[in-house]
Amino acid sequence: MQPIPITAVPLSLQGFIATVSAGFPSPAADHSQKRIDLNDHLIRNKEATFLFRVRGDSMTGIGIYDGDTLLVDRSLEPRHNAIVLAVLNNEFTVKRLYRRGGVVKLLSENPIYPPIQIKQGEELSVWGVVTFNLHKLY
């Protein structure tokens, strides 16, 4: 698993500036069109943001599936309960960070995987914070 740097080329899509109902459809909505650069919406810090492809099913409980692409920002401070890309004993893994009272764990979002308690002598570093999941629907 290696990071893929973000290129500087803007990715513009035609967009509609309107909200869309996920419940009952709205009978009338004003629709205006404008170009949207996805970089402006998905990336806070271009130099520190990378793409990673997910392998495995340990995070399916929060909608991260095998084959999804994660945007990971290295400039963000990893906080308790954040989804992070961690390096544990020289291997990348995506997990929820638990950090309370001197206890550090990596938590899966799939009940078949137990929490990973970081023990003395193990090497853990948080490589970056996951900011978006690009999940294909169709």
Image (cartoon, rainbow, N blue to C red):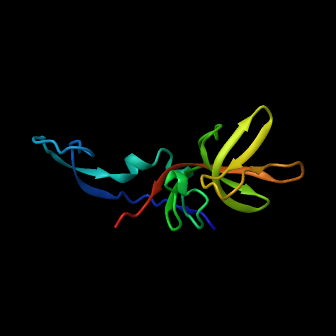
Direction top: furthest residue: 101
Rendering quarter of residue 137: bottom left
| Front residue of 133 and 76 | 133
* 105 lies left or right of 36: right
- Give the residue displayed 10% in from the left and 42% down from the top: 27
78 versus 70 height, above or below: above
Task: Locate residue 64, reporting x and y percent.
Answer: 52, 57
Direction front: furthest residue: 112
98 versus 47 height, above or below: above
* 137 lies left or right of 77: left
Q: How many marks?
A: 0
| Front residue of 98 and 73 | 98
Task: Locate residue 61, reporting x and y percent.
Answer: 54, 53
Task: Locate residue 113, reporting x and y percent.
Answer: 68, 57
* 45 lies left or right of 12: right
Quadrant (top left/top right/bottom left/bottom right) for the N terminus? bottom right
Quadrant (top left/top right/bottom left/bottom right) for the C terminus? bottom left
| Front residue of 114 and 129 | 114
- Give the residue displayed 79% in from the left and 59% down from the top: 89
Direction right: furthest residue: 121
Task: Locate residue 81, reporting x and y percent.
Answer: 62, 40
| Front residue of 6 and 111 | 111
- Give the residue displayed 36% in from the left and 57% down from the top: 10
